[in-house]
Amino acid sequence: MKQLIECVPNFSEGNDMNIIKQITNEIESVEGVSLVDVDPGKATNRTVVTMVGTPDEVLEAAVKAVRKAAELIDMSKHSGAHPRFGATDVCPLVPVANITMEETVAYAHKLAQRIGEEVGVPVYCYENAARIEERKNLAVCRAGEYEAVKDRIGTERWKPDFGPAEFTEAVAKSGVTAVSARNFLVAYNFNLNTTSTRRANAIAFDVRERGRTKREGNAATGKIVKDENGNPVMTPGTLKATKAIGWFIEEFGVAQISMNMTDISITSIHQAFDEVCAKAQARGIRVTGSELVGVVPLQAMLDAGKHYLRMQGRSTGIADREIIKIAVKSLGLDELYPFDADKKIIEYILENEAKKGTKKLVDMSLTAFVEETASESMAPGGGSISAYMGAMGAALGSMVANLSAHKPGWDERWEEFSDWAEKGKEYHTKLNWLVDEDTNAFNKIMDAIRLPKKTEEEKAARAEAMEDATKFATMVPFQTMELCLGSMDVAKAMAEIGNPNSVTDAGVGALAARSGVIGAFMNVKINAADLTDKAWAADIIAKGQAIVDKAQALENEIVEMVNAKI
């Protein structure tokens, strides 16, 4: 699964759209990166840009954008309402999918180094990427703003982490940049059945981490309690990593609670929604729906949908799009306007960008897929079909599990079957991906064949590329074999304990999976035969044969079970 990070550079220009467009053009020129949002502010004279993609590609886009900003923006002439000290003022990286914060920090340091060395802009690392404890707080790094850079940059205390440590003519123009790694921030609003901003604020104070000012006697009008230093004492709210306030939305004629969620790994979207609902109800108010501002990671929506499915005692091993529908309805995300998953979920935005100009087999109808297979083109071939058979077999296992979870009289067993449905889903999702990956593997071999071979160096490079591509084309069907075999565990369990009315479906799933194993093994063997590395080839074939033996034995066992129950 691809690693995805978000990058949110803030550029010190919010009025000249020509400059902003030149900067964003640099981002859009990098393949593998999607420009999600461009938000210019005239009063702040600042533009917040959001891009998402694979880490190395995002870093490349960020470096190009920072370079262009340094070229076009003169900080010695800049003014605006927002604190700033550089043409690219801040450039935070945010983990989105399949990547840890530690890995994101490493990428932030790599980005900071590239900006310092390749662009010549001084860089301070802050928040999770801070290399010096004092620099964790951006406000401390940016104290005095651009006007203070000249005096600070040459001191030992404020020597940049990367890049020039003197106020050169170039630095006077570009200013400095702050790079960080931070958690994903979600802007989330809750719609209330009231027009009272005061009551909306009361609920916001109940839940936000900072809470409310402690008072003697009356919670709203009593004397403020202060500590020994004379500072107000706060009564914390119930939701960690959240900030919230109440306001009135003229357009819809209702009050809202506006919440910034600074770490959804600590407080999730569904936890926030349920808690705000509870606090609102305690005050005689109802949350009628909610609104996600900007984009959101897929996992956050899946977590929410699964949470509400579990509350209903329903299986969570269903298609992602169906889980998202449950999340949208449960959170009331379509109350003010339709919630378009393709425009709100980061992974779907990237997926749709990648689809432009491409033709994926798994996006075809069944009829189109069959007709494409039957055509004179060499792909899809046996490898893709083996993966598709395996995917269908695994999907049948999930189907039996989901039917079992929903069977009348088996309500107390829903979680058991939900777990099996989840396992089946994991297998058929990965096998679905391998349908196209097998075709991609074939294309890699064709690309290697087309390499020039006039000189000895070209011949050697071509031979190495051919070997690498052939190993890749061997490993793809081998992965298919492993996944097909794994999915047979689901088929076996469903034949044993699943809904007896669907036992033949479990049996057909096992047959399809076994066929996927044997078909993929044929591709392993024919591809391995072309390898120069005979030891590697012999090893992968031996491992493949062991998988075939296990699959055939398991198939016989499952078929016996099915026949005994028919």
Image (cartoon, grey):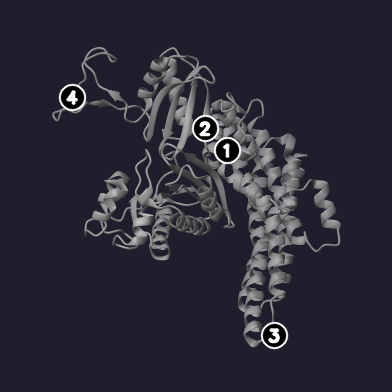
Find the distance from the CA under tag 1 to the CA under tag 4. 44 Å
Q: Element under label 4? A: loop
Amino acid type, residue under disc 3 in the picture: Lys
Q: Residue 350 appears at what percent x and percent y?
A: 60, 48
Near mark 2 (Cα within 10 A), the count class, few <14, some 14-19 or many ≥20, is some
Disc 4 marks a residue whose amino acid type is: Lys
Question: Quick check: 75 above or below 519?
Answer: above
Q: Nearer the viewer, residue 490 or 285?
A: 285
x 63%, y 70%: residue:
540
Which residue of the protein is positioned furthest toward the bottom in this rendering? 456
**Mark closest to the chain's N terminus, 2 or 1:** 2
Neighbourhood count class around disc 3 (C-alpha, 10 Å): few under 14, some 14–19, many 20 upward: few
Q: How many marks?
A: 4
Q: What residue is disc 4 on?
A: 226
* C-alpha span from label 3 to label 2: 58 Å
Q: Which mark is residue 344?
A: 1
Q: Please report contact status of discs 3 and 2: CB closer than 8 Å, yes or no.
A: no
Give SS at disc 2. Answer: strand
Nearer-N-terminus badge (3/4)? 4
Between marks 3 and 1, how big is the CA–CA gap? Answer: 51 Å
**Mark with earlier residue (2, 4):** 4
State the image coordinates of residue 43 (x, y, percent, origin top left). 42, 36
Question: Mark 3 sits on what residue?
Answer: 454
